[in-house]
Image (spheres, rainbow, N blue to C red):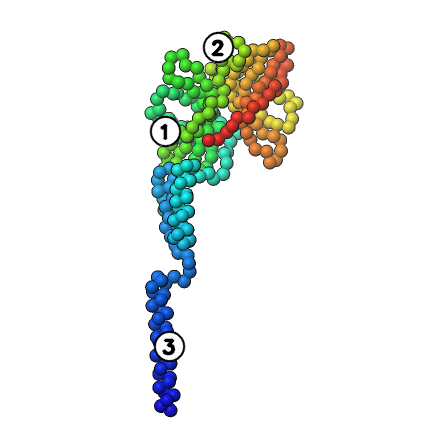
Amino acid sequence: MMKKTMKSVMNKKLLAMVLGLSMALVACTGGKASTKSSTTAESIVDGKATETVSEKDGTTVEKENRKATTAAVEDMPTVGGWSMNEGHFSPKDNKEAMEAFQKATNGLTGYRYEVLSVLGSQVVAGTNYAYLCKGEVVVPDASPVYLLLYVYEDLSGNAEVLGKKDIFSGSEEGMTGGFTLNTGKTELKDNEEVNVAFKKALEGFTGVSYEPIAYLGSQVVSGTNYAVLCFEKASTASAETKLSIVTVYENLDGKAEILSTEDVDFGV
């Protein structure tokens, strides 16, 4: 009887030691029951740091954070593509875009931009805006060009110019051979001859639709060529809108047709 009691006591002491060692081991490892922990990581967008919580191990988060930081510096992260402002590209109809333009160009010297149309926007970590502008160097007798200007506005409302692309420049007025740049109003409703020729060229035209944005210039041939910037869209359900310069030819008898189209590379 004494032996059984002694043995029972010894077993209880051994069990207590095992439990004690297990609890000590858990305490040393911080009580982790999983290889994952809630880790705070920094992501940098436009030079500003924000904190996000990730349910990953610290090593993975650190590596991905360094990768994201490098990517943010080299190329702004993109969410979705460009949304084109079909039917409402007038500057007066795009208040937020024009406010971003004013902030981005305020204080710029040496070059002047006149916004003719707000072509579209793109959601990033903030918003990118695309504008059709008439631009020229601020010097006497400067020759203007038509260009695409891109502005980025961050989530705090700060804006900057991302870049620009010249898309159309004509020869000086009076020169022969090339296109003469339209230096006046650009909407077709303000250019009756161009508007009439454009509409005649599209009569019975199928398969593709063209929404005119701006009259860019003309070229005298045996008749007249008119260059018109348009939104172009094929008549299929999956077709995307793109930007094109459409050349309309009107002969001396007043008959008009689409002579050619040229895609405009869009985006920064």
Of 145 and 18, nearer the camera is 18
| Disc 2 target residue | 173
Along the horizontal axis of the image, is 246 left or right of 164?
A: right
Of 183 and 199, nearer the camera is 183
Task: Report x, y in % for residue 41.
Answer: 37, 48
* Label 3 packing within 10 angstroms: few (<14), some (14-19), many (20+): few
What separation in Å lies between label 3 and label 1 (alpha carbons)? Answer: 73 Å
Q: Which mark is residue 103?
A: 1
Which mark sits nearer the N-terminus, 2 or 3?
Answer: 3
Q: For the residues labelled 2 and 3, say whether their Cβ atoms are less than 8 Å apart.
A: no
- The residue shown at (57%, 21%) is 246
Which mark sits nearer the N-terminus, 1 or 2?
Answer: 1
- The residue shown at (52%, 26%) is 264
Nearest-to-viewer mark from 3 and 1: 3
What separation in Å lies between label 2 and label 3 (alpha carbons)? Answer: 101 Å
Of 249 and 196, nearer the camera is 249
> Is residue 15 shown above or below 168?
below
User: What residue type is disc 1 on?
Assistant: Lys
Numbered disc 1: secondary structure: helix
Task: Report x, y in % for residue 42.
Answer: 36, 46
Q: Is residue 212 visible?
A: no
Q: Which mark is residue 195?
A: none
- The residue shown at (61%, 27%) is 208
Nearest-to-viewer mark from 1 and 2: 2
Which mark sits nearer the N-terminus, 3 or 1?
Answer: 3
* Label 1 packing within 10 angstroms: few (<14), some (14-19), many (20+): some
Nearest-to-viewer mark from 2 and 3: 3
Q: Which mark is residue 15?
A: 3
